[in-house]
Structures are given as C-alpha cells and as structure tokens.
Image (cartoon, coloured by chain):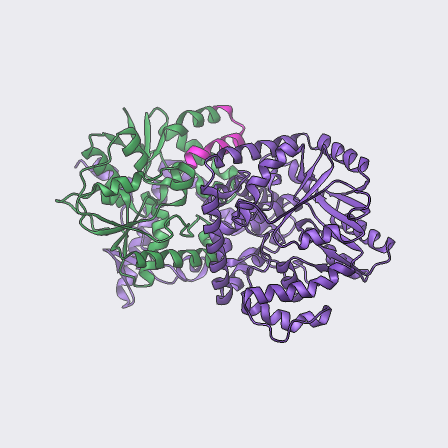
Chain colours: A green, B purple
Amino acid sequence: MRVALMVTCLNDAMFPDAGKAVVTLLRRLGVDVEFPAAQTCCGQPMVNTGYLDEAVPVVRSFVRAFEGYDAVVTPSGSCAGSARHQHSIVARRSGDPGLATAVAEISPRVHELSEFLVDVLGVEDVGASFPHAVTYHPTCHSLRMLGVGDRPERLLRAVRGLRLLDLPRAEECCGFGGTFALKNADTSVAMGADKARHVRESGAEVLVAGDSSCLMHIGGLLTRQRAGVRVMHLAEVLASTEGATRAGAAR
Amino acid sequence: MSRTFVGMPPFPTAARAALADTQLRANLAHATTTIRAKRAAVVAELDDWEALRLRAAAIKDDVLLHLDEHLVRLEESLTARGAVVHWARTAEEASEVVAQVARAHGVDEVVKVKSMATQEVELNEHLAAQGISAWETDLAELIVQLGDDLPSHILVPAIHRNRAEIRAIFEREMARVGRPAPADLTDDPVRLAEAARLHLREKFLRAKVGVSGANFAVADSGTLVVVESEGNGRMCLTLPEVLVSVVGIEKVVPTWTELDVFLTLLPRSSTGERMNPYTSTWSGVTPGDGPQEVHVVLLDNGRTRALADEVGRQALRCIRCSACLNVCPVYERTGGHAYGSVYPGPIGAILNPLLKGVGHDEQTDSLPYASSLCGACFEACPVRIDIPSVLVDLRAQVVDAHRSGVPKPEALAMRAAAAAFGSGGRLAAAEQASGLAGRALDALSSLTRRGRRAGGRRLVGRLPGPGAAWTDARDLPVPPRESFRAWWKRTDGGTR
C-alpha cells in the first residue's frame, strides 16, 4: 500500500511538528509514508470564502500531488472534509471533465488521521505513552462532515498514562471557521472564549484536537489568558512514547 | 409595530453591538440551552427520526419540482370551498390585498395570528400607513410589538427578553393600546401570561377581521393548517367574520398523508414537544361556523427566485421550526437582530440572500459569511437542509457578483494564495519568506520584555492593521524557522 502524507498548508508552514508526529507514528506502525513535494493546500480557504475560480489551480495541484497513491492520510478533519466533499464542486466549476474524474478517483482515498489508524490500519492502541491529564475537542468537520465518531477518543484511551477528562459542551464549535475568524472576529472570539472556559473547567493540562487550525484559535486565546493549558495535535500525543514525550513545544 | 429591519448594518457590525450586550448574551444562552435540551430529549424518543427526515425532505423536494401543479390544485380546492384566492408576486402586493379586505369592511384594526409571512412582507407597517392597527396576539409577538422592538427568533421572537424586562414593557405600554397591565403585576410567568390574556381578550372579541399565515396548505382538500401553542391562533381563526391568510407558495403539501410527517417533525423540532397544544385546520368557508369570508394570499416574494437556485432551492423545504437557530453557536451569541431580518440564524443566513439575490446590498451579502460552517444546523434540521453547503455556494455567488469591480484586498490575497498554492515549488519559496519573517519577528520580540512563549515557541502579541482581527484577542505563534517541507527535504523524511 502506497501511503501519502497530506500535511496541510497550515501544518507545513506553521505547525511542522504535527506533520513530523504523523511520520513518527506511522513509521512505528510499519507504514512507509511518503511526502509528495508537489502538494500545497486543499483549497478550502478559497472555497469557503467563495473564491471558486481561485480554488481550481489549487485542486489541480492537489490531484497532481496525490494521484497514484492507495491512501492519503492527513492530520486534519477539516482538510480531509474539504478533499472529500468540496473538490467535486471545484472540479465542476473548472468545466474540466478530466479534473472531475481525477477528483472522484482520489477523494474517497483521503483519510483523516484517526480514520486511517482505526479503519485502514485497524489499530486503536498505537503504543503511545503520555502521562498527562488531557481533554479532547472534537472539531466540527471531523465530527459532522466526516463522522469520525469516537475514534479519536478510543485512540486516546489506549495511550499509557493518559487521563482523558470530559470537556463540557465538547461538540460545540470553537469559533475558528477559517476566514470566519477574521471576517467575523468578534463572534469568533466570543465562541472561542466560551470554549477556552470549558477547557479550563475540564481540569486538563493539555487540550488535544485533530485540527491545528482550531488549536491555533483556542490556544491563542488560552495563552492570551495565561490559562496554563497547552494545546497539542492528536498526532503529537499518539506519537509520544516513554522514551520521547513530545512537549507540545510547537504551539 | 413601527420598527423594521430596513437599514440594518452588515452582520459583523451588528454582531459586535449584540456581543457587547451582556444581558442579551445571558438571556440567549439560557433560552437556547433550555430549548436544545428539550428538543434533544423528544427527538431521541423516536427511533425512526432519520427516516422521517428523509421522507420529509423527499416530499418537499417533490412538491417543489411540481410546484405549479400543486398550487393550481390548491387554488381549485380552495375556490370550490368558498375561499377567495389571491396571487401576490411581491410583499407590496400581498400587504395590499389584506389592506383592501380591511378597507372593504371598513375596519381600523385586525387581529393577527403569529405569522412569518406577514412579518416578511411588513404587513403591519403597510396597514399602519393606511390607519389600520394590526394587533399581534401571540404572547412573544405582543411583547415585541408593545416594546416597539424587533423579533429576534422565528419561534420565540422575544427570546432576547427576560421576564423582568417583559414586566416592565407590559406596565409601560399596555395602557397605551388597550387594557392596562394589572397594578400588582409581578415577573412570575403565570402572572405575565394572565396580563397578556386579559389585554388581548377584548381585542379578540371586538375584531371583525383576522389575519394569519399557515404552516401548511393541503392541495387536495384546500385546507390551511396553523400550528400553535397558546390558543390565540384558534381565537383569531374562529371569532372574526373575515379571515385573510398570507401563505408562502412553498407551504403546499399534496394530501393529508404527507401532512402527517410534518406534524410529527415540527413540534419536536421547534418547541421540543411531542405534540403542539393547538392545531387548527380550515377548508374555505363552513356555513354558520367561523369566518364567513375567507381569503388566501399565495405569496411569491422571491420564492421562485430561490427555486431557480440549484443548490439553494432546498431552503424552500424549511418549515420554520427554528431548530437551526437554537443549536447555532453564532446565533446563541449574537441573537437574531444581528441578521437584520425576520428570518435570523442559519436559515436566515441562506433564506434572505436566496429570496433577495446577492450583489445588491452589503447587509444581505454579509449573511452567508455569518457562520463558522460547523454543521450543527444541518444535523438538527428536520427537513435535512444542508445549510453549510448552501452557505458556501452563496459565498461563491457573492464573490462572483463582485468580480467585475475593483478587487478588494481579500480578493487580491486569494489570487496571491491561488498562485502560491498552484505549485509546491512556489509554496516552498513563500514559506522560506515566512520562515525569514518568523526569524525576524523572533529576534525582534526577544529584544522586548513583552515577548512571551508557549512551550518553546515565541508568540506574536497584538499586531496593527489587518493582523489585529486575529491578534486583538488571540496570540499567534511566530512562524517556525523551518517548514515541514524544508525539514523533509533536509533530513530526507527524517531519516538523516
């Protein structure tokens, strides 16, 4: 099975440790993951802001980068959702039947990390160790667009030493929402402030989620509030072992 | 009611004011949390909920596909049962039909059942301009009307008010338009309801003309259906001599068999009840029983426009339950007024642009962006309107409508991003620049005492200009010195 890592533009440019953690984790599980250097972005920032024409070259580059792979794994529910549910819209807009065919071919092979681990590899215990009190925020697109269900929690419960604490109103959006965070900054921050309050109420030392974008937003509020709770990508927790605990230094 | 939504600012501006109102935030959080829990409990009771949703969506889609035939059938049935059918293309035409009926009977007042269609066409303002008072008889609508306020929710238009505020409105305003509030009024809900009941009773008994909308219109029997909780609707529909109902053309269902599905879905989705207290149905005129002159105004006002929208037409499935408002994290914080329409919340964010068209005014164009696309609305919608997908499609329509003009900074940024994201090589170059910028920021912030870190990473504090939208309330990590792609290249995927 040829497996490609779709690291996402945000992780690539801002949170490379999340990408490195996926590589570490997958190698430990015996997957020889490749990184197609032609990859850029899934195009979601353009699509969700209404710039469909601008998304066409981005989806083209996505298709060029990932065609031929049996599976594409990505540490982002949102970007997986974009590839699976929005690329066909962009392909239709392009008027290019070749692009539509390529998208239809690749889209179903894109998996968010927890889906890939549980559904494709069939593992829940990834051999990780992370002796901390953790709470998990299910990001909206992983939850409602992909339907990952409790896969991330099942993975976290199998981690040695990890204490998983309930997050009040866990399924409520954190308010990131891509360009929503800028175009409607006040509302975004109001939603995020409530999420940050719930995170503090959970009593966790670490907030874990499967999307660096949401973590950047919630984490940005938590550090501004000097909350003393750090944020980590799910991949970073799952990549941690007794010998090498990642400290979430990237955020 | 003299206030309208005309001239409301775009959503972000209106939301900013609403977010600053702590009383409003508290009222909304309390109300939406309560109603969400009620809905969740009664929806969980039905093990075929998803099947019902699918059936309801299919029925509505089929009706919309053959809307012309169903409407003609409805007109025939209504006419055969003694109703007078009027067709209204616009809000103005619909309101004028009601005004004509009122004038024909020489009345200067009408009583109203809660109705979204009449709110949409601004009927009360149209009648007021002709010296005709329209009395709202739904408790929440009464609160809004007496307070010279605007509705902020489809089902509970006074959701933004708490009981202390309602008591103050009653004490201050009731005497101005009829029976005053009792002198010993408290903010106990039972006492407030009693005050409203006494105030409204004389209006019910006096009015010659009643005005309503309809939740459904059954084509084959010519039956209009109103679903309500308070009994005020039943009074307005039975006591006056004349009844005028303004009904959106998408409200038609073929037969009572289809109606059954919606009467199961609606109360559970809206009030969180298994069944609503009052369901009134009437088919034209019944001699010697109820209104003896019955008018039905079939309203377009942008609905055929929405119908022509391939992605957006699913919004016409809406049964105005407001489940999407109650679960929406944006609505919960901003309230309904920020949407600048009688249709607020997620459904309003798609319905208003679909009915009015985009590219004409900034307020309407701002609505499709008033969402984080979290998808909670789609999950709650009893007729499975994929609101996030419609929002995204409408955003594209907004952008396309402005493509010919001078490009905004946002459009230029998107073009630049499209160029960078068009190839891995160009992106690598851009990231190198951001890495350099990161190093510069890192060096710069290390010189100031205000530099902070999270983990080992330096944080950007408040930035000026466009960066302020993010950094006014949120920190931002300084870009890393090395991107993932540069790391992969340097270490051959971490192997050296």
**Residue A67 is inside the magenta segment:** no
Q: Residue furthest left?
A: A243
Residue farthest toward the front in the current orientation of the protein: B288
Pinpoint residue A48: horizontal percent, then vertical percent.
48, 43
A62 up-or-down from B454: above or below: above
Occupied quadrant, residue B182: bottom right
Identify the residue shown where x is 25% and y is 51%.
Answer: A134
Question: On the image, which quarter does residue B190 sit in?
Answer: bottom right
| Quadrant where the image shows the N terminus of chain B | bottom right
> Residue, x 65% and y 71% (percent of image)?
B181
**Position of residue A239 in the picture relative to residue A213 (left or right):** left
Q: Main secondary structure of the magenta part?
A: helix
Q: Could you tell whether B116 is left or right of B44 in the image?
A: right
Residue sitting nearer the eye, A94 or A44: A44
The verdict on residue A84 being magenta is yes
- Residue B340 rendering spot, x and y as whole percentages: 61, 56
Residue B376: x percent and y percent?
46, 45
**Which residue lies most toward the bottom here?**
B183
Answer left or right for B49 relative to B235. left
When the figure is inspected, residue B344 is found, relative to residue B390, above or below; the finding is below
Residue drawn 24% across and 41% down? Answer: A21
Indicate the position of residue B52 as horizontal and vertical percent values: 53, 35
The picture quadrant where one finds residue A139 is: top left
- State how many labels appear: 0
Q: Please give the range of residues in magenta.
A: A81-98
Q: Quadrant of the C terminus of chain B?
A: top left
